[in-house]
Every structure is written in C-alpha cells, then in structure tokens.
Image: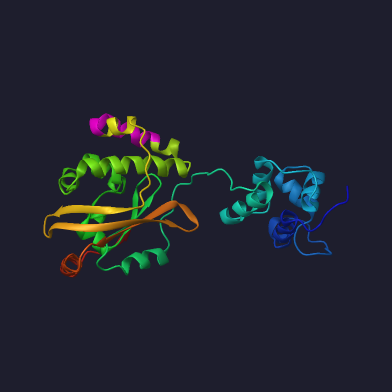
C-alpha cells in the first residue's frame, strides 16, 4: 500500500509538531533539518510506537483509538479546541466530554454582561453554580455577592432559600424545569460525579427536590418566560434565553430581558439607585 502524505489528519499532526520548540521541551538542541519535533520525539512523548505514529501521519493503519489520540494530544500539548479538532479528523466525532472545574469567566465576558443595564444576566457552571452576574441580576434576581460562594448555586437557592422561592410566580413549574435542565447540563458536561454530592444534599434537605429528581425528567433550558414578585418592583415579567459560551463547555449564559418597556424602565431606575456592583466568583 503506497503511503499517503496529504490526509487531513496527517497534515494536522505535522503542522502541530512543527510548532513545538524542542529546546523548550528539554530535547536536543542539535541542528535539525526542519522546525519542531521529530516524529519519534512526538511518539515518545505520547508513549506510542514511532512506527504507528508515522503511519498516522502517512494516512495508514486505519482509525486511531481515542486513547491514542488523547496521548498524542498530550504529547503535542494541544488546547481543548485543538484536541477536539484532532478527534474530528481522526475519528469523525468530538472526544468524550471531560469535565473540568470552572476557572471563572474572562474579563471580556464580564464586560459583555455588564453592558446589559436592564437585562439581568448570569453565567453558571454545568453544576449550576453562579460564577458571574451583572448589576441588574443582583437587584432583580439575587444579590449573589452577599452570599458565600457555596451558596451561589441555583438549585440550593430554589430549594433552600425562602425568599427566592416566594418571589417565583410559578414555583412548581419553574422548579420542575430547572431540575430537568440541570440534569441535562450535568450529563452533557460529563459532570455526573461532580453533582452527586449536591444531589444527595438536596434530596436530604428537600422532599420536593427528591421527588423531581426521581422523575428523571430531562429538559433544555433554552427560552421561556419568568414572572417574579419583586420586593420593590412588584410583579415583573422577564423573557429568558440560554446561550452556550464558545470554547467553554463548562459555562452557560442566561439573559433575562424585560418583557415590556415599563419593566425595563423600572429595572433601570432600581439599578441606578441601588448602585450594586457586579462580581465574579
């Protein structure tokens, strides 16, 4: 079988190894004919056969296993997006999700939600911890900055905070939808083991959560309407939309838009008078 040198996978592997600095990785600084690492050096770093790696670059040997691709991704020091692209080329689908604890949000994302003066916005993790919010969210939804980080969890607030519960016009429907969406988010992010402790805690403290969890309902937290009985604003209606954060499968953005101009004006006045500051967890 003649070797091929122009497969997408082979071209990508050659490109990635050509970008690595041998000296920075503690490899020999002797003169090299081409930039980057040699094939056998990548194979050694990935702990796979040099022959097998060479075949992959040449488009031979069939589809590599997920384990081999993960080893190569580590050896080539690929980012998560580069690793995903490697799997798409090598296996035709993204890698299995590996959940990582969130590291907060970027300043750019925080500035984005801060710009939404009359629309409460929060950034949540796959385990529904709120890690960023804007001023509107602090005055309309919950003053997350006044809570310890462990209590900035949407499930804990819904099932354990009387004030949050009483503010919901339709607590039963909202709670069922939230639990179903929470289950889907955790599974999608590969965080089933990470939510186990939280689920056990909530099942012990709330019979209502326990019953909803046992229903095994799964939902998508996409779009909908939320009606709140706010202590200052009275009854207020918000239209919400959920968004993925590109490049951050561990995070989701929820924006609550006032349903009417009157509600938007009332929120604006409250935000400006309260002077709440946004915060990231």
Q: Residue at x 30, y 67 (%)?
A: 116
* x 88%, y 51%: residue: 2
Relative vertical location of residue 66 with respect to residue 227 in this rendering, above or below = above
Vertical position of residue 9 compared to residue 192: above or below: below
Quadrant occupied by the C terminus:
bottom left
- Which secondary structure class fits the magenta region best? helix
Count of marks, rendered view: 0
Is 202 included in the stretch rendered in magenta?
Answer: yes
Q: Relative to residue 101, is residue 22 drawn left or right?
A: right
Q: List x then y, in percent, for residue 94.
A: 58, 48
The answer to which quarter of the image holds residue 68 is: top right
Report the magenta residues as a range. Answer: 196-208
Residue in the image at 61% along x and 56% along y: 82
Q: Is residue 36 magenta?
A: no
Residue 44 pos. (x, y %)? 75, 46
Asked whether 65 or 45 is in front, the reply is 65
Q: Is residue 209 above or below residue 278?
A: above
The percent coordinates of residue 131 (x first, y second) are 35, 54
Name the one closer to the observer, 171 or 112.
171
Residue visible at 19% across and 45% down in the picture: 170
- Asked whether residue 145 is in view, the answer is yes
> Which scheme is used to colour this image of the protein?
rainbow
Residue 191, located in which quarter of the rendered image?
Answer: top left
Instruction: Point out the residue furthest to the right here.
Output: 2
Q: Please indicate whether residue 61 sits to the left or right of residue 106 in the image.
A: right
Residue 127 as seen in the image, left or right of residue 91: left
User: x%, y% of residue 274?
Assistant: 17, 65
- Which of the two residues, 56 or 148, is positioned nearer the viewer here? 56
Residue 206 seen: no
């Amino acid at each position: 079988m003649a070797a091929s040198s122009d497969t997408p996978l082979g071209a990508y592997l050659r490109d990635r190894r050509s970008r690595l600095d041998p000296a920075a990785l503690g490899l020999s600084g002797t003169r090299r004919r081409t930039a980057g690492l040699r094939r056998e050096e990548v194979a050694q770093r990935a702990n796979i056969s040099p022959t097998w790696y060479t075949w992959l670059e040449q488009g031979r040997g069939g589809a590599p296993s997920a384990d081999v691709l993960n080893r190569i991704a580590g050896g080539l020091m690929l980012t998560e997006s580069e690793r995903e692209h490697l799997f798409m080329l090598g296996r035709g689908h993204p890698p299995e999700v590996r959940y990582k604890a969130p590291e907060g949000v970027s300043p750019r994302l925080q500035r984005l939600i801060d710009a939404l003066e009359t629309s409460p916005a929060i950034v949540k993790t796959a385990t529904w911890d709120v890690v960023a919010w804007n001023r509107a969210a602090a005055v309309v939804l919950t003053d997350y900055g006044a809570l310890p980080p462990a209590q900035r969890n949407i499930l804990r607030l819904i099932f354990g905070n009387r004030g949050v519960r009483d503010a919901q016009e339709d607590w039963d429907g909202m709670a069922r939808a939230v639990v179903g969406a929470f289950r889907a988010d955790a599974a999608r992010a590969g965080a089933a083991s990470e939510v186990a402790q939280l689920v056990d805690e909530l099942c012990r403290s709330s019979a209502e959560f326990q019953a909803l969890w046992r229903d095994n309902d799964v939902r998508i937290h996409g779009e909908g309407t939320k009606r709140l009985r706010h202590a200052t604003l009275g009854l207020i209606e918000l239209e919400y939309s959920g968004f993925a954060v590109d490049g951050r499968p561990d995070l989701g953005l929820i924006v609550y838009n006032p349903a009417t101009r009157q509600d938007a004006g009332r929120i604006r006045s409250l935000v400006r008078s309260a002077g709440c500051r946004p915060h990231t967890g």
